[in-house]
Amino acid sequence: YWGEVRLVATKVTGDAHVPAGQQSWWARLAAGDGGADPPVGVGAEALPLVPPLPSSAPLKLEAGVQLADEGFVNPRWEEGASLEVRSASSLLLTFGEARGSDAAAPPLLFERCDPAGLWFVDAFRGGALLPPQVCAEILARTGMPPDQHAGCLEPAPPASVWARMTRNLWAAARRGGDETKAVFWEGAGCGLDEAAGRAN
């Protein structure tokens, strides 16, 4: 609605229902006048200013979430959720009575990450970003002793990354029956594992 100010979140990695690049949820910061269009003769300079957030936390805002069937089929926005501003770096999204959502779904906690910190990309879960402590928990569940975790959390050398990429491309070409590409990627990966070993 005209005059309404919203905080909008966009999915970075996405999931099976709502893919990356699509809006995930919104929270209402300032209410509009209820109309779909601005009043005649009123320009953008008349948009309401976002009210300053109170210093006392938490603050609850009305919110909506985007839901969809698997494969981003039948996407729709559902209201009834709420966003709790716990601090300048912590938000809690509760689904509440958002129609069509699982009311029993646990709330989602969003925390500002340290851009200079260490993060891991989970290649088996759509590129989800994992902080070191989550990786340590995963390793612990496999039964690996804590004193062996450090070696598994070291950044992979670029040569190792390239070697894995070329192996994956080689395998994809073989599955697709394209021997020319398979031979190309097999040759492109020659020596990368040895180079990675020297880097270590």
Image: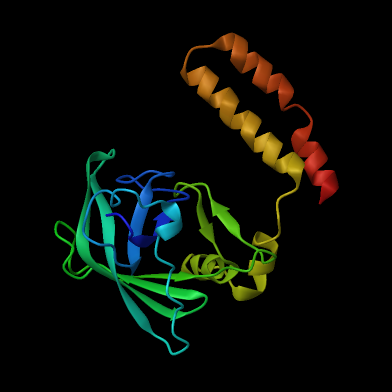
Q: Is residue 80 above or below residue 155?
A: below
Residue 106 in view here: no
* Outermost residue toward the front in this view: 41
* Outermost residue toward the right in this view: 198
Q: Is residue 21 above or below residue 44?
A: above
For this view, does 91 lie left or right of residue 192? left
Name the residue at 60% across, 14% down. 181
For this view, does 68 lie left or right of residue 89? left
Q: Nearer the viewer, residue 148 or 71?
A: 71
Please state, as top left, top right, bottom left or bottom right, where the N terminus lies in the image. bottom left
Q: Is residue 163 above or below residue 25?
A: above
Image position, residue 61 (x, y; %): 31, 73
Q: Quadrant of residue 82?
A: bottom left
Image position, residue 192 (x, y; %): 76, 34
Image position, residue 191 (x, y; %): 79, 31
Image position, residue 155 (x, y; %): 71, 55
How many numbered marks have been drawn onto this rendered protein structure? Answer: 0
Q: Is residue 167 above or below residue 200?
A: above
Name the residue at 52% across, 68% down. 134
Name the residue at 39% across, 65% down. 48
Q: Nearer the viewer, residue 124 or 59?
A: 59
Name the residue at 24% across, 51% down. 67
Colour approach in the figure:
rainbow
For this view, does 53 lie left or right of residue 119? left
Residue 147 in view here: yes
